[in-house]
Image (tube, grey):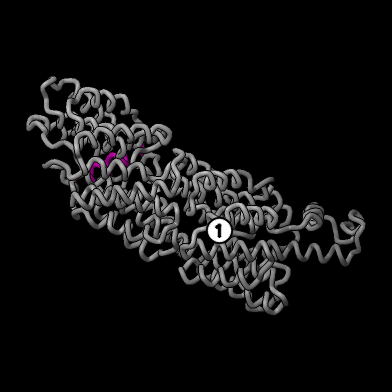
Amino acid sequence: MTATVPALRPPAARAEGRAEGRAAGRAAARRRVSSRSALASFAEVVSPTLRPTLRDAEALGLRGETRAALDLLVATAAALPVSAPDGDRVAIGELAVVVCAWGSELIDAHPFLEDLAARVRSSDARGALLFTRGRAGTAAETPEILTRALAEFRLAGDLRGQAVTLGELCWPREDGLSGDYRVTVGREGLALARRTADPWAVAFCAGRLAGCETYLDRPSALEHWREAAEVLPSSPDAVTAEIASLNQFNWAHTAYGHGDYGLATRVAREGKLLAHGATWARKFAAVEALVLWRTGDHVGAVAAGRAARSGRPQMATGMGGIVLGAVSLEREGRPEPGVLDEAIGHIEFDEQMLWLALAVRAEVRVARREPSPLRDLRSALDQAARMGVHFGWEDLALVIAREDRAQGAEVLEGMADLWPTNPRGAALRLAVEGLVAGGHERVVEAAERLAALPEPVTAGRLLHDAAGLAPDAASGNALRRRAIDLFQAHGADRSLAAVLRDRSLHRGADLPAVPASQRLVSTAGLTTREREVATLAAQGLTAQEIADELHISIGTARGHVLRVREKFGGVPKRKLAQLLADGA
């Protein structure tokens, strides 16, 4: 899940910026700029002379011209007479935060909002601007700012303001508030919002409570996301649409995290149709990319991932980068971590996506045989534990358990009280328990549950893991054959090659060849001795000369050479030099 204010992002290339500017311009042309007060606004009275300027600033924001939009709002506020209604300053402050959220760079509007709050006369207007300031603040400062806003709203007797401020306090962030306290505050805020019958207040508070419940893995989260997304009109004004898009996005995001891929796809597609501006359309494309990757459509995932990355760098760029990195891991001989490193830079403020990116990057490090491939993972789990989060870190635990059973056991114990119970989370817990305990049946059951979601590649990899734990060769080979079928059907080249190179696999004429993308991979599961033999064979030594050099029998040397060739897809011995050079 994500907050509404973007994190600091690097500037885009000039050509890329022009391309997104044109796309954003087309999106703005499709979306009518607000001609009335926003449903989300606290500005009860706005001067008629100010409205055209607000529409101009909104149009600039929708076109992606964030700096120009904010400059116009700052200049307009400075020119307001002292006698201007408080609603003028409230409307300007609210729009300033929204256009910053639409933008591709972090522009610090906090001093501007504080100045506006100091210039209004009424408590409800001051509460509105402090509430707006609190939504745009850092995690550490947000509780104090929102507490000030709540006091102003209570002084004014403004139930709507109190409701949304409590809702914002409920939102999960690293600010020291407990999960149970957040839920209590969020429920109080939603109850107040329902009393007001204000659709934006209900949407806001239901979404904030749903976010808290999502991180705590409460079953009511998806229902509150549904309420939050559906309570607003289908075509709200651009300011109100910000929370509408956020709720729709997080509803899709949560469904994806639970493994409800059909719901996630439907909600994301609806969100794209309703989104104001290119930024939200790209975020919904990113959710689609994640779902396509998980469900085994690598071609579709790449297309959607590229669409998510098509504009200036921001959160959608990072989400798309995770998908492209994960598909690259399966389909390229030597996957590079660069796209994942870049993705992490764009999603540092979204813990769920950050943890997923770290898990995929660790798998890339394993594939590249880098030293300490699991580095960073335990610190990420520590962060999840500090936050009391029950959602989004499960893939980290699976990667650790698959590569290091001892560490997996420690994670299983340390995170025992935080494991989610949603369908996907429960399946991954079962998988980790089976891997740690060497329990073949539990790993198979986990694979079956994931296959039913459907998540075929993860299921196939667990079937391969289970094969290594099976009680007899026949059972193990049956599981490997099932894994092969899943990998072939979904183009999972690396996972398929891993099974085909498995020494325990019963060879037969019906086995497929090692995929072409994996045949020139020097890290094809060679043991230390096999690498020594491969290096000598690549230098042109005969089997006898290799045996003499390594002090082994000629039969053993020949057996090693044969296995090395098989692991590289059955290539002739003379090609080993090229393969080792390619993978160096």
Residue 360 at x, y percent in the picture? 55, 52
Residue lying at 23% horizontally and 40% vertically, measured from the top left = 161
Image position of 580 (left or right of 271): right
Q: Read off the residue under disc 1.
A: 330
Depth order, front residue of 256/373: 256
Asked if the magenta segment contains residue 16, the reply would be yes
Q: Position of residue 240 (x, y in %)?
A: 22, 45
Q: Secondary structure at mark 1?
A: helix
Q: Is residue 218 left or right of residue 82?
A: right
Above-or-below relation of 173 to 364: above
Eyeballing the image, is 529 above or below 102?
A: below
How many dots with numbers?
1
- Determine which quarter of the picture holds residue 214: bottom left
Relative image position of residue 471 (x, y in whole percent)? 72, 75
- Which amino acid is tagged 1? Glu
Is residue 113 visible in the rendered structure shown here?
yes
Q: Is residue 485 left or right of residue 504?
A: left
User: Magenta segment, which residues?
Assistant: 13-30
Q: Is residue 125 above or below residue 391?
A: above
Is residue 371 toward the left or the right of residue 207 in the image?
A: right
Depicted 317 relative to depicted 260: above or below: above
Residue 500 location (% of width, % of height)? 66, 68
Main structural element of the magenta stretch: helix, strand or loop?
helix
Q: Would residue 9 be seen by someone viewing this image from the given angle?
A: no
Front one among 283 and 519: 283
Q: Is residue 275 magenta?
A: no
How would you rate the neighbour count of disc 1 (Cα within 10 Å): few for under 14, some for 14-19, many for 20 or more? many
